Amino acid sequence: MKKRIVIFASGSGTNAENIIKYFQRTQFAEVVRVLSNKKDAKVLERAEKLKVKADSFTKDELFSEEGILKTLKKMQPDLIVLAGFLLKFPEIILKEFPNKVINVHPALLPKYGGKGMYGNFVHQAVVENNEAETGITIHYVNENYDEGAIISQKKVKLSKTETAETVAEKIHKLEHEWFPKIIEEVLLI
């Protein structure tokens, strides 16, 4: 029986699409649902094109016992993956699925983590601080932003001429190469 993955995303969904395609090429696991807190998020369209059920939800549904938690209990995912999901993840779900929720962060935590540190905010801070390297951190999700146990970090060197845009490109390459592989490793634990 294939392992079941549910993805939460808020935006365009390139990571979600990459993860879906990666597992469609395996017999080991599959993405069974994509959920978004934005009804017009591009990720919903990407998932449906790849024949994965996709739905949006309200913030109230996310934090309600009768909302997303009830949906997840029915699906019984082996892993919940946050791929560009910008809301703080609810404790009611974390308690129901301990050590089954992971996230990718576009920096080498603990640097550049916390509330408000996502996407270009992170990349701009990395550039402004003249970092020699940056990378991605794949970590378990707990009740605090970006503080869960680190599963894996992948690094990339930076030059003195980097911009937030060039850093973003490098980070996306790392995410697309490594996030599906690390998800697979976590599922094998």
Image (cartoon, rainbow, N blue to C red):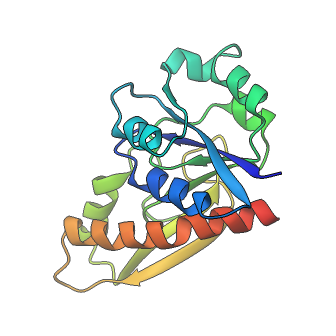
Q: Is residue 157 above or below residue 112?
A: below
Q: Is residue 150 above or below residue 29?
A: below
The answer to whether residue 141 is seen in the rendering is no
- Decide if residue 60 is on the left or right side of residue 168: right
Picture quarter containing residue 76? top right
* Screen quadrant of the C terminus: bottom right
Q: Is residue 93 above or below residue 119?
A: above
Residue at x 38%, y 24% (from the top left corner): 39
Residue at x 47%, y 59% (from the top left corner): 18
Percent coordinates x, y for residue 151 in the rendering: 67, 67
Q: Is residue 126 above or below residue 7?
A: below
The answer to whether residue 61 is seen in the rendering is yes
Residue at x 74%, y 32% (from the top left corner): 75
Viewer-side residue, 61 vs 42? 42
Residue at x 29%, y 54% (from the top left corner): 121
Percent coordinates x, y for residue 12 in the rendering: 34, 45
Percent coordinates x, y for residue 45 in the rendering: 38, 37
Viewer-side residue, 138 vs 41? 41
- Decide if residue 57 is on the left or right side of residue 63: left
Percent coordinates x, y for residue 35 in the rendering: 53, 33
Total labels: the figure holds 0
